Image (cartoon, rainbow, N blue to C red):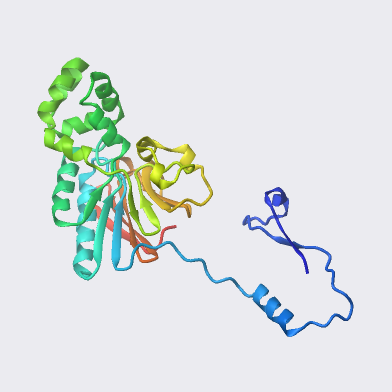
Amino acid sequence: MFWRVATVSDRHQLGEAGFLVCARATPRVAKHRIVTKPMLHFLREFFSPSPPARRPAVPEGRRYYAIGDIHGRLDLFEALIAAIEAEIDAAPALDHRIVLLGDLVDRGPDSAGVIARAQEWQKRRNLRVLAGNHEDMFLAAFDRPEALRHFLKHGGYETVLSFGFPARDLAEREIEELHALLPRFVPQEIRDYVAGFETMIRAGDYVFVHAGIDPARPLSEQKRSDLLWIRERFLNHEGPLEKVVIHGHTIFGHVMDCGNRIGIDTGAFRSGVLTALVLEGDQRRIMQACSGEDGTVAVVHADQTA
């Protein structure tokens, strides 16, 4: 029996679920043909269900916590830290690793507090921090006045306020004056710490980046600008990638699991929801710190990404 596999041009033959189907051609089987045992074995093998595909996994014995874009929401960050610490204490035999996906700063009310808390947590835990496009703008703001102007328009206003910069000065002084004053409020050690953020972290079948990757390039040839800023070329790519990409940068109303990538930026600064993706073996689950209308923060859990 001969089979024809449907192609993209056969989409009118596909079901609503979009599965490719096989259409039978006219069989060329002679009358009274004897079916031998080898043929029966072949048919049995041919029609047997395929083994399930191996799920992406992180190295055995490790548990990863990837935290999405915090954007100055220290309250939500503190709630996730407390929940993660409780899990670490309950499973001391595991190798726990934490990845912040970048954009710690801007838009939310306490970027300075988020940076300080990340530094403190990093002294006690295996914590690595990725650079986001907002860290890129933050550092550029110290180089020239026009970069500072751009930074202030895209969430940097709240950031410099969190470092103690007077609101009256921000409102009244010229941009050149603000640029000259800025280093007085943001110490060099803070700038050096942020400048040391990484751009990519690999873990088994996964790779962590801030924005995404260029689908046309191998991981070893990615550009920093793409890792921090890319959007449509990455988000619109539907084919397989070298590793499953865990990223932030683009806001979704829920965790976006597309098979080749998982987006976990749930817009903490405006939604009040900060998401962490937990990876252990080939299992995934999520933790979310959610702020209520009364200002209280609760942590909720889900066993699997949607």
Q: Where residue 250 appears, x then y in whole percent? A: 39, 41
Q: Where residue 289 appears, x then y in whole percent? A: 28, 53
Residue at the bottom extreme of this rendering: 37
Give above or below for 133 relative to 50: above
Quadrant in which residue 150 is drawn: top left
In the image: residue 197, left or right of residue 285: left
Say if residue 130 shows up in the picture. yes
Give above or below for 129 relative to 147: below
Say if residue 296 shows up in the picture. no
Q: Residue at x 16, y 42 (%)?
A: 113
Q: Where residue 242 appears, x then y in whole percent? A: 45, 52
Quadrant of image for the C terminus: bottom left
Residue at the right extreme of this rendering: 31
Q: Nearer the viewer, residue 1 or 277?
A: 1
Counting the numbered discs, the total is 0
In the image: residue 215, left or right of residue 25: left
Give above or below for 23 relative to 196: below
Quadrant in which residue 211 is drawn: top left
Q: Residue at x 62, y 57 (%)?
A: 17
Q: Nearer the viewer, residue 118 or 94?
A: 94
Quadrant of image for the N terminus: bottom right
Q: Residue at x 19, y 58 (%)?
A: 82
